[in-house]
Image (cartoon, grey):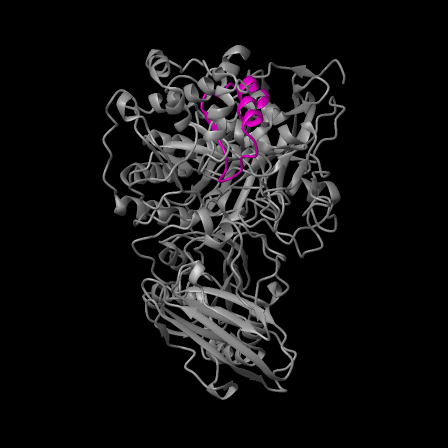
Amino acid sequence: MTDTVSRFPRRSALRLLGGAVAVVAAATGGFAPASRAHARDGRGPGAGARVEGLLARLTLDEKISLLHGATDPRPLGQAGYVPGVARLGIPPLRLADGPAGVRVTRHATALPAPVLLASAFDPDLARRYGQVIGREGRALGQDVLLSPMVNLTRTPYAGRNFETFSEDPLLSAHLVAAEIEGIQGEGLIATVKHFALNNQERDRTSVDVRVDERTLHETELRGFEAAVAAGTGAVMGAYNKVNGTFACENEELLTGVLRERWGFTGWVMTDWSAAHSTREALMAGLDMEMPDGTHFGTPLTAAVRDGGVPERYVDRAVRRVLTVMDRFGLLGGTVPQRPDRDAEAGAAVAREVAEAGATLLRNAHGTLPLSAGGSVAVIGPTGARPLVSGGGSAHVVPEHADSPLDAIRSRAARVTYALGEDAFGKPLPASALDPAFDTEAQRVDAGRTWTYDGTLTVTDAEAGDDWTFVLHYSGTPPLRPKVLLDGEELFPLVPGWDEYFMGGLLTHAADGLSVRRKTLKPAGGKHRLSITAQGGDTGQSFRLRRITAATRAQDVAEAVRAARAARDVVLFAYEDAIEGQDRTTIALPGNQERLIEAVTAANPRTTVVLNTSSATSMPWLERTGAVLQMYYPGQEGAAATAAVLFGDRDPGGRLTQSFPADDEHHPVAGDPRRYPGVAGTEQYTEGVHVGHRWYDAEDVPPLFPFGHGLSYTSFGYEDPDAHWAADGLDVAFTVRNTGPRDGVAVPQVYAGPAPDLRLDQPVRVLAGYRRLTLRAGEQRRVTVRVEPRTLSSWDPKARDWVLGTGPRTLWIGASSRDPRLRTSVRVGG
């Protein structure tokens, strides 16, 4: 390390999180860094007389009842419940999932997925997104929101990439802070998750993530630090281990980083069933176990009474919970009045977010916008049936969700539709079954059992091809019909929570029946088929279908006929993500690649609309006219998609994650140590080169780079200028709309490495950005503030941030791979 490196205190810039906007902490007090003693006993600045008075009056059993989940006597379909203490006026807490809207059994606004929100590059929009969730959460009887998620997008396979924001630490930090301000400004307690390094679903409950200190602070932790600076009331611990210790009992994370370094004064809860100990977890800094008291219930009571756990640690955890409750007005005998839902306002924000995040990846030969006077063929299952959200914790029950097909029909003169890709199967032909039975309409009455024992014949023409058996059923999981083919159960129950995750597109048929699938390659000839279905208390219905090479060919042929007969084609492609499962490839699932190839061959004016969770490979790209990335666009997604397709709105979204060309060229490709891990251990050997930084470091061209997104107009960049001051760097430049239409520009500032730092540094880092709407011909002078933290690196020897001084190169452009201007500035000195 050279003498020219400037160092600043650990907490001197908690809110200096860099870039386009200043992140301002919540006005309510209690977020100044706590002293080491206060961090360890919970007596932070927010712990007041009321909390201490209650703590003194609580019995041990009452204290411990506040530290774990229980069964709600009046459930609202939420994820968790913590009973209060009625005699002391401590109300219960209801905790609901809500990354894209409040997940209860009642209607709520289904907002676009957070990745689509992030694509707008607009913290103010993230704040209003949070306000919708905050108001609705309170209106729907909830007190704590189990969101937002800020884990970085590290692998394109991660099943919950749609629930988080970005691969970039700076962008994620801005957005999580703004959303938390919106949520908590409405009186709902936010929970940032999953602390930390929960970047995959595969083996998530057991994998040991090994990461060096510098990588941890410069990448994954930056968003969590921003959440603490914004005043988040709660933090959720992750399932995985971090450097050998489960995250929910990791003292270095829960106390050393979260409380002593960042000054967090709220409470830490587990992810559901993520606790592994009693004494170790409590003393490490865990405050609450969810959804029950496996470790923090009776075992904790016994440990305190036999002297194994000092009661002061229980008091510390209770103090933290009560302090947050007091801050949100939940103590003192009266709970703040709950507002009414404003469904109309929620829908307006949902549509605005979907339009703002719509990301145009390709637009050749003026394919878009579409003309209202032309003929359009709509193809694909998500054209007729909206894919509102991903599954699992993100699933929301909206009051309505129109189909893109209906929205396009309201705009175009002539519209036809073809399914193209059948995800729910065709009826089994009666001729294939002996004895024959109606596989489409089996009803089992309550208290009865229905059985079948016969044969299924696979013809020689069908032999060796993939057969996907599709079961539709109305029973709850234990009553799912048992289907055996040659003695093998096709749809066995999945252990753990994964069995109950639902939502998205594929888990339910259009009439609401649950759906399961199994793909085999049966040999030709007769196969024994056995079915047992129980009616249970209320009875159930089921049907058994199949998808084969022959049925797929029929669907593609129908789509090709529709494409040839239309001027334009809008082909909706999907990938259905759900909590608990990672993808195995970034290719589109099923027969969709062959469908796109056939349709684009028939009509090159084909726009592919992607309703996918994350990056997608596109071997068919050059044959398309346009590609529009819409992710999971929420309940207003149909209207928003149509508005962009027909040019009512400029596609203002930009990619928050790099799209690799294929499964062999991305940061974790070809190295099982990085993903999914070897012998239960995963290593972040890419270091600080996460996301777009890796593509630069390795000189690997992505299919589409971070920050990429096209407009229906064009923009020019001029006159860069940069000035350093002690409190940051100001980068100024002019943006001009050089095209014939009004449009959205998202200029981005990237900073090169510091010559004075003897540390491995990225080729460039995102330093700031600005979202602009410019009229045709309009120009605007823009200044982007880059904060010292963005220009700093974590020094593992000093265990602190150090400012990267010396001459720094700055690029201003339209993506990480599209620099339009270049300048330099001397930092520090």
Residue 51 in picture, x, y percent from top left:
36, 16
**Up/down of 186 relative to 45, above or below:** below
Q: Is residue 104 above or below residue 643?
A: above
Q: Is residue 602 above or below residue 302?
A: below
Residue farthest front in this picture: 306
Q: Is residue 431 visible?
A: yes
| Image quadrant containing the N terminus | top right
Question: Who's the residue at 43% across and 78% down the image?
Answer: 439
Q: Nearer the viewer, residue 212 or 561?
A: 212
Instruction: Using residue 400 as the reference point, say whether residue 736 is left or right of it.
Output: right
Which residue: 60% across, 24% down?
251
The quadrant of the rendering that contains the C terminus is: top right
Residues rendered magenta in the picture: 256-283
In the image, is residue 202 above or below residue 380? above
x and y, in percent, of residue 102 in the image: 36, 44
Q: Is residue 39 magenta?
A: no
Q: Is residue 323 left or right of residue 716?
A: left
Residue 825, position as x, y percentages in the image:
65, 25
Taking depth in this image into account, of 364 and 258 the one nearest to the observer is 258
Out of 358 and 184, give the one closest to the viewer: 184
- Residue 781 in percent (x, y) is at 48, 33
